[in-house]
Image: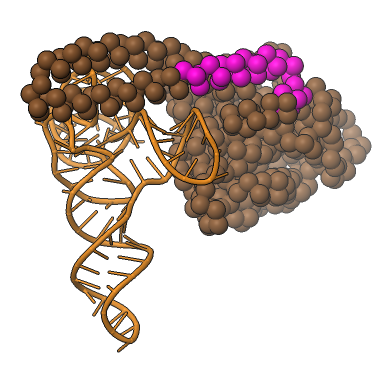
Amino acid sequence: MLDIKFIRENIDLVRKKLLSRNEKYALLLDNLINIDLKRREKIKDIENLKNILNDKSKEIMTLKKENKLDEMNNLLENLKELKNNIDIKQKDLNEAENSFQEIMLSIPNIPLDDVPEGKTDKDNEVIKFVGEPKKFDFDISDHVDLGKNLDILDFEVGAKIAGKRFAFMKGFGAKLERAIFTFMLDTHIEKGYTEVLTPFMANKDSFYGTGQLPKFEEDLFKCQDNFYLIPTAEVPITNIHRKEFLDEKNLPIKYVGFSPCFRRESGSYGKDTRGLIRNHQFDKVELVKFVKPCDGEKELLDLLGDACKILDLLELPYRVVKLCTGDLGFSSAKTYDIEVWMPFAKEYREISSCSLFTDFQARRLSVKYKSSDKKESSFVYTINGSGLAVGRTFAAILENYQEKDGSITIPKVLRKYMNNLEKISK
RNA sequence: GGAGAGAUACCCAAGUGGCUGAAGGGGCGGGUUUGCUAAACCUGUAGUAGGAUUUUUCCUAGCGAGGGUUCAAAUCCCUCUCUCUCCGCCA
């Protein structure tokens, strides 16, 4: 959520920034400003009347004590009318407040100045390439065929158990998955992140806090009793400190958490239907930070570096791109994607998304800190990123580390998590 | 799933319709006394959100959350959340 005071004082800037995301926000912004103006007048009016009511109510008590019953009854009649009047106006104000909140919650974050302008992912800016895609001297397979031949990956069984877009892992496949996320967790813990294991379902308030609700409900699996399955551990982890005052000396706070992620993928029929790339359930290790505003940019780059380090250690080729304004996620002010090289498709695929949310989430969540010098409290900045998506890492390892005979060499850093196994073969 | 108890400020806790935005204690801040410390005494101690005004103050909301009754609610009524105890069930 943006700061309404900032919007009032910087209308032109906000409009320009929102338009750089999408033109449709122009109308929304006009609506907001209009409603805000009206609602403030209504507030002023009602608070005035309430003030009068409060004063007069106290008079009733005095009159009662002094036994001036006639006067009291007279006043009582007047106050009933006044109260009635207030009630009517209050309902009107509540409606205005509701539409105001609704719009506030559906306006995205404004991009930072160095975010490149653009409409789609074609306009994203490639920052750097790391590692050389390996040249194979044989016909390579994709991870689905490789996994199937080794009997470690089975999408038919996944479909039988649950449906399409579900994976099933077996034997060294299951073990490799476990090795990958354990390795990721251990690496991040070493970097000073605190490991957390959270609920994999969360309530509505949590989803409003991080920005998935109210706009993106159709992307979520909804359960009974008002629970939603988490689409990323970002939701529970960022909500750890909802409605809290943090101590400045504890910042930055850094968490790493593993979770399965559940996504309906409602808008992606027919896209990436094969393999581990886009499933309803996948594992992910997530990094989340709460930082002081002045450290936002630096901490984002640090987090990006922590995510990249996983691929460095796994010796997988990748590139880093900076998302353009049109491709930016709803809550994000700046995002770097990490894309891993997939040899069969001969393309880079997103494996991590690292974002700085400025105070957008913190304002929705109400996470503040009190600085030691200023007496004023302010919202923290939140940052998060995948570190990394485990399923896609699994796929990338299979494809990049495949051998002519269909076996898979285990990346060196993972071997200690797999009883020193060097190769998965038939 | 059944039965009961509870949620008040940093902490403990009083408070069943108006002089309570909150007694009392602890803690913390300041002061007096004092060679220093301690003790004693005095004194201060809602942070917040919103609106107006602007640099000063005023107003509104706020006693777990949300509704309701009333001129007036921490207090009465309803719904919900969480915590605790007992029974049942269960990994």
Residue A401 falls in image quadrant:
top right
Q: Colour of chain A?
A: brown
Quarter the N terminus of chain A occupies: top right
Q: Is residue A146 above or below residue A46?
A: below
Q: Tell me the magenta residue range.
A: A14-42
Image location (x, y in percent) of residue A158: 59, 22
Residues A169 and A67: in front is A67
Nearest to the observer: residue A384 or residue A209: A209
Q: Quadrant of the C terminus of chain A?
A: top right
Q: Residue furthest left?
A: A67
Q: Is residue B6 above or below residue A281?
A: below
Numbered label tally: 0
In the rendered structure, the colour chosen for chain B is: orange
What x and y, as percent, mark residue A194? Answer: 54, 51
Q: Position of residue B4 (x, y in %)?
A: 13, 31
Q: Is residue A390 visible?
A: no
Q: Residue at coordinates 30% horizontally, 11% vertically from top-left?
A: A84
Could you tell me which residue is drawn at 10 percent across and 21 percent down? A68
Residue sitting nearer the eye, A266 or A119: A119
B37 over A402 or under it: above or below:
below
**Which quadrant of the view contains residue A321?**
top right
Which residue shows up at 30% across the image and 14% down it? A82
| Predominant SS of the magenta segment | helix
Q: Is residue A20 magenta?
A: yes
Q: Is residue A67 above or below residue B32?
A: above
Quarter of the view holding residue B88: top left
Residue A309: in magenta span:
no
**Model colouring:** by chain
- Residue A368 visible somewhere in the drawing: yes
In the rendered view, does B59 fall on the left or right side of B63?
Answer: right
Q: Position of residue A332 (x, y in %)?
A: 67, 32
